[in-house]
């Protein structure tokens, strides 16, 4: 490591996606701090910078998958579609970065490899891959929940003669599928978005499915000028609804139980929700995520839709999820996913029944035989929530490693801080609603809380804040309790539980008690003098 003087700042932020950009604006422009953002990519965007795969589009609707902190920004930006495509979100975030003059404090192409808390100086010492050293009293991770890619460890991958890509590290110049036999591994939200788009261009697409998934039609379409104007007139109310709801989305969850509705009424409501499409299908009844039988009515409705869409009964059956309930894993939404299996150039392979054994120079071999491929796309997801944090080798008091503190799964207080790691804040960290929520809503709440907390410390001439071990202990129990009050932990292969990464501890990571309830807890904690934290000089 070069023996150079560390550059000093008031705060260092890691990541320049939705959270890092807003955190920079809040600390620099509201508190007047000297802030440095370190970003591995060559541009802003975070997860959207890396996830450029075909069909990449947001599952939250554009008008609320956006910042609310600036009314002027809300009024001037024009979303073109119901769900924004990856390039449109990139244009939006680039616009935000320019409009608030953020880029001058962002260092691109800079990956953080090490961060250690120097107790004597009460400062974080941060080291980058290039050996650069920076220091600041506060370290804020804005690294996203789904940014550490999970490429399965399949023997023989290095021998493959064709191209292969993970969707979360998609080449900037794009990929040409024309005339190619493409294999796609994975049928989560990403695989379900990519399948119809790849199938349009490829000579042949083979989808390798381990777990069949429910999916709801997105019903994407252009946003009319009238719809845009109406939204802009109502933005304050829309944001208020997002902040006071369960998932940070601006809509109500039905008050009706799926079990109390008669069969005809229930069917009619599901049909209506299917027509509207999108994630709000989940809100059709109040108990879809809390009551098994209620959940089964939604699951069975979607199974019926799959049977109705997919012509070949064997393919339809294989695409039909039976091992988990609807939305117990993060529900995908799609544009003609199931319809794509009616195309002549698409086939489906069951790698649950016949697991993948190896990648060969010419394709992929399962226990049932070899599939010859020119290209492989891994839509195999992420080492979610903890992966990006643990990749940085974070050391707290006494040199203790975050990896050791979290050896049995993540432990935090409010998903904001970890005991033993003073002045480290984790935006949308494990233990917060984060991925169960519309992300910008969750991000803004965290950034505002962190900003207010740092303001409080400065106003009171305090230098440190650290979560107490007993408070973290109680919070971990609350996170567990909230998860087990729902059906969410029942899906065996869910990344919410870390189940998709071999060897990862099975712990339900996000807080499932609802966004509004969580935000109220955070507010109360601050109002009660940062209860559960130790503050010091
Ligand atoms: O990843 P996933 P994703 N052999 O983990 C399979 C967000 N997102 O990238 O279920 C064979 O959900 C795995 O199978 P199984 C959203 O929150 C948002 O799709 O583990 N298969 C599964 O089918 C989402 O939930 C948007 O049995 C293997 C798939 O790969 C999250 O990102 C768009 C395998 C992985 O699914 C992650 O979604 C896209 C193996 N060895 C994503 N390993 C928007 O809103 C894994 N699989 C824009």
Image (cartoon, rainbow, N blue to C red):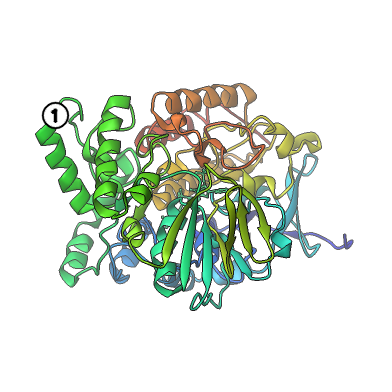
Q: Element at badge 1?
A: loop
Residue 324, relative to residue 336: is it above or below?
Answer: above
How many callouts does the rendering have? 1
Of all residues, the one furthest to the front in this rendering is: 369
Furthest toward the right, the residue is: 3
Q: Quadrant of the C terminus?
A: top right
Which residue, given by chain and number where applicable, does mark 1 sit on?
Answer: 261
Residue 273, image x, y percentages: 20, 46
Q: Which residue is nearer to you in this view: 470 or 382? A: 382
Q: Is residue 101 left or right of residue 107?
A: left
Across and down, in percent, residue 177 comes to 50, 74
If the image is split into quadrants, where does the N terminus sit? bottom right
Indicate the quadrant where residue 454 lies: top right
User: Which quadrant of the figure has residue 95?
Assistant: bottom left
Foreground residue, 236 or 536? Answer: 236
Q: Is mark 1 within 8 Å of ligand 1?
A: no
Image spot of residue 169 (x, y percent) = 59, 64
| Left or right side of 16 for 2 | right
- Residue 261 relative to residue 42: left or right: left
Tell me if I can see residue 55 in this picture: no
Residue 350 showing in the rendered view: yes
Q: Is residue 533 above or below residue 317?
A: above
Q: Position of residue 435 (x, y in %)?
A: 45, 44
- Quarter residue 197 falls in: bottom left
Q: Residue at the location (58% across, 31% down)?
A: 506
The one nearer the camera, 523 or 300, is 300
The residue positioned 77% from the left and 35% from the top of the image is: 400
Disc 1 packing (10 Å; few <14; some 14–19; many ≥20): few
Q: Note whether 508 is above or below 212 in the view shown.
A: above
């Amino acid at each position: 490591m070069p023996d150079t003087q560390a550059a000093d700042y008031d705060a260092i932020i890691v990541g320049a996606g939705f959270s890092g950009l807003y955190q920079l604006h809040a600390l620099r422009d509201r508190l007047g701090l000297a802030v440095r953002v370190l970003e591995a990519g060559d541009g802003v965007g975070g997860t959207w910078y890396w996830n450029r795969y075909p069909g990449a589009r947001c599952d939250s609707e554009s008008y609320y998958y956006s910042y609310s902190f600036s009314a002027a920004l809300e009024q001037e930006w024009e979303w073109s579609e119901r769900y924004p495509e990856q390039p449109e979100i990139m244009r939006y975030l680039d616009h935000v970065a320019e409009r608030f003059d953020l880029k001058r404090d962002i260092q691109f192409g800079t990956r953080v490899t090490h961060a250690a808390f120097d107790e004597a100086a009460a400062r974080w010492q941060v080291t980058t891959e290039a050996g650069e050293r920076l220091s600041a009293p506060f370290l804020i991770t804005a690294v996203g929940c789904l940014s550490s890619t999970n490429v399965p460890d399949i023997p023989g991958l290095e021998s493959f003669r064709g191209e292969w890509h993970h969707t979360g590290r998609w080449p900037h110049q794009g990929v040409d599928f024309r005339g190619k036999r493409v294999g796609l591994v994975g049928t989560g939200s990403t695989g379900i978005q990519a399948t119809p788009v790849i199938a349009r261009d490829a000579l042949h697409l083979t989808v390798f499915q381990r777990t069949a998934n429910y999916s709801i039609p997105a019903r994407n379409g252009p946003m009319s000028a009238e719809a845009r104007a109406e939204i802009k007139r109502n933005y304050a109310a829309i944001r208020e609804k997002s902040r006071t709801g369960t998932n940070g989305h601006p809509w109500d969850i039905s008050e009706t139980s799926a079990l109390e509705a008669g069969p005809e009424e229930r069917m009619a409501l599901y049909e209506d929700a299917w027509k509207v499409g999108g994630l709000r299908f989940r809100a059709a009844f109040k108990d879809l995520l809390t009551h098994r039988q209620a959940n089964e009515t939604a699951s069975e409705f979607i199974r019926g839709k799959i049977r109705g869409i997919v012509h070949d009964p064997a393919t339809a059956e294989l695409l039909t999820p039976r091992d988990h309930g609807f939305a117990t894993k993060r529900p995908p939404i799609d544009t003609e996913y199931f319809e794509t299996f009616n195309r002549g150039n698409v086939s489906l392979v069951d790698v649950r029944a016949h697991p993948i054994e190896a990648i060969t120079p010419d394709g992929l071999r399962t226990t049932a035989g070899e599939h010859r491929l020119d290209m492989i796309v891994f839509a195999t997801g992420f080492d979610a929530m903890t992966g990006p944090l643990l990749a940085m080798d974070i050391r707290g008091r006494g040199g203790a490693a975050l990896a050791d503190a979290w050896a049995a799964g993540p432990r935090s207080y409010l998903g904001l801080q970890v005991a033993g790691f003073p002045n480290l804040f984790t935006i949308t960290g494990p233990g917060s609603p984060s991925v169960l929520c519309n992300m910008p809503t969750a991000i803004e709440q965290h950034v505002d809380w962190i900003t207010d907390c740092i303001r409080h410390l400065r106003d009171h001439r305090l230098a440190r804040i650290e979560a107490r071990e007993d408070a973290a202990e109680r919070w971990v129990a609350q996170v567990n309790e909230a998860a087990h009050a729902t059906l969410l932990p029942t899906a065996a292969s869910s990344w919410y539980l870390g189940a998709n990464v071999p060897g990862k501890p099975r712990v339900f990571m996000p807080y499932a008690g609802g966004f509004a309830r969580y935000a109220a807890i955070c507010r109360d904690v601050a109002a009660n003098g940062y209860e559960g934290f130790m503050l010091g000089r």
